[in-house]
Image (cartoon, grey):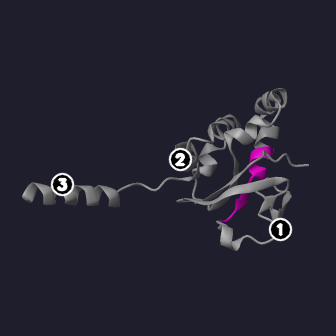
């Protein structure tokens, strides 16, 4: 009985000690953002998204990146300046949960604005939000079905 109580106490204390994950760690742990993680590394943005934030990231999945023709994706990954512009366009300052999303123009970290619509589901420019509110300790991730290329 005493061993069972000690084991239970250890389990409870280890649950309480579990570290929160930042946006990058949360995305990597999900397993469906490998291309995004690679792109963030190439662009040198990993440390930024591991920072205090808060950030709202509209994160394209590996499937979304697969929709970009290979030659275009390779060219993007080879052009750090353009890659940085594309990736930071997917990030909005602050933590915006799905319940707080409103239609309209939103300024991105990249500096331009993206258009959010809510008719028949949430869209960010031409990308559809397919999963919302993946919480991280420095913000939130909303999953989108396309890579958004800013004008």
Which mark is on residue 151? none
Range of residues picked out in magenta: 86-94
Quarter of the view holding residue 82: top right
What whole-number distance in Å separates the C-alpha atoms at marks 3 and 1?
51 Å
Image: 14 above or below 82? below
Q: Residues under labels 3 and 2: Cα distance?
A: 29 Å
Kindly state the secondary structure of the residue where label 1 is placed: loop
Q: Residues within 10 Å of mark 2 (few under 14, many from 20)?
A: some
Query: In the image, 17: left or right of 39?
Result: left
Q: Nearer the viewer, mark 3 or mark 2?
A: 3
Q: Is residue 60 above or below residue 8?
A: above
Q: Which residue is rendered at x = 54% and y = 53% of the image?
A: 22
The disc label shown at residue 7, or none: 3
Residue behind mark 2: 25
SS class, disc 3: helix
Q: Quadrant of residue 102?
A: bottom right
Quarter of the image where one finds residue 73: top right
Determine contact: label 2, label 1, CB under 8 Å: no
Q: Which x, y percent locates residue 115?
A: 85, 62
Query: 116 or 109, which lies in front?
Result: 116
Is 49 contained in the magenta span?
no
Give the image location of residue 14, x and y in percent. 30, 55
Residue at 54 percent of width and 50 percent of height? 26
> Image point 65% across, 35% down: which residue?
38
Pointer 1: what residue? 119
Q: Callout 2: helix, strand or loop?
A: helix
């Amino acid at each position: 009985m005493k061993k069972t109580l000690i084991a239970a106490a250890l389990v409870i204390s280890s649950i309480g000690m579990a570290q929160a994950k930042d946006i990058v760690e949360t995305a990597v742990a999900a397993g469906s953002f490998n291309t995004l993680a690679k792109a963030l590394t190439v662009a040198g943005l990993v440390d930024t998204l591991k920072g205090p934030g808060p950030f709202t990231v509209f994160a394209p999945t590996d499937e979304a990146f697969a929709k970009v023709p290979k030659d275009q994706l390779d060219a993007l990954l080879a052009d750090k300046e353009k890659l940085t512009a594309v990736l930071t366009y997917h990030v909005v300052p602050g933590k915006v949960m799905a319940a707080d999303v409103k239609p309209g123009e939103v300024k991105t970290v990249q500096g331009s604005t993206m258009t959010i619509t809510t008719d028949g589901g949430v869209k960010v420019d031409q990308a559809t939000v397919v999963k919302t509110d993946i919480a991280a300790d420095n913000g939130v991730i909303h999953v989108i079905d396309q890579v958004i290329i800013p004008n």
